[in-house]
Image: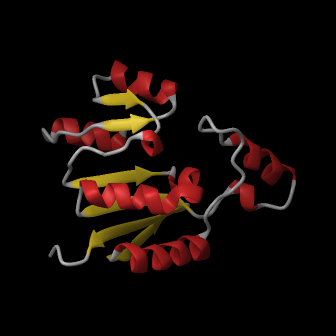
Amino acid sequence: IFIATYCKSNNIQWAGIDSNQYFVKYAKNKNFNASCGDISGISELPKADVCLIIGSLYHFHTDIHQLLSGMLKSCNIIIISEPVKNLSDQNNWIGRIAKRSANAGKGNEQFRYNETSLQNMLKEESEKLNFNFKIIDFYKKDSIITIEKNGTN
């Protein structure tokens, strides 16, 4: 909601898509442009200057090539904020509960990226999809990354 509020106060147009109906309802109650849907089921994303994916890349790890390819057809820059330090990494009862707590409509999702697996995936996909990526920062538990199509600057 922080980014949505910033965009609204700076007259920046945006559209949010989320599979969580409660997130969407909350956003709509704040008069944000949000719709409920699964982006993996959208054949073509609308053209945009930038695509953001925040805290949900791990939901698409089995279809990551398709997701990134679709986003890069829509825009030249992708900004990712992805948790890489997770409670689910703990080898105790907290970790077991956390592994079962994420459900984006496909059942419990136990997969999570860590710093190494996220970087390895991006290296592999950058070669296939011809993009550069840069790790900008680590903020709390998240890795902040930019992806830019080659030949766009």
Residue at 57%, 72% in the rendered image: 115
Image quadrant for the C terminus?
A: bottom left
Residue 137 image point, x, y percent: 41, 71
Residue at the extreme front of the image, as rendered? 43
In the image, taking residue 40 as reference, residue 31 lies left or right, namely left
On the image, which quarter does residue 4 sit in?
A: top left
Q: In this view, does 43 lie above or below 32?
A: below
Q: Which residue is drawn at 34% across and 37% down?
A: 16
Q: Where is residue 111 in the image (x, y as percent from the top left)?
A: 68, 57
From the viewer's perspective, tell me whether residue 88 is left or right of residue 26: right
Query: What is the quadrant of residue 135 in the picture?
Result: bottom left
Q: Nearer the viewer, residue 60 or 81?
A: 60
Q: In this view, does 14 lie above or below 91?
A: above
5 vs 68, left or right, is: left
Looking at the rendered structure, the number of numbered marks drawn on it comes to: 0
Task: Choose between 12 and 110: the one closer to the eye.
Answer: 110
Q: Which residue is drawn at 26% across and 63% down?
A: 77
Quick check: 63 above or below 28?
A: below
Q: Which residue is drawn at 56% across and 61% down?
A: 141
* Percent position of residue 147, x then y: 33, 69
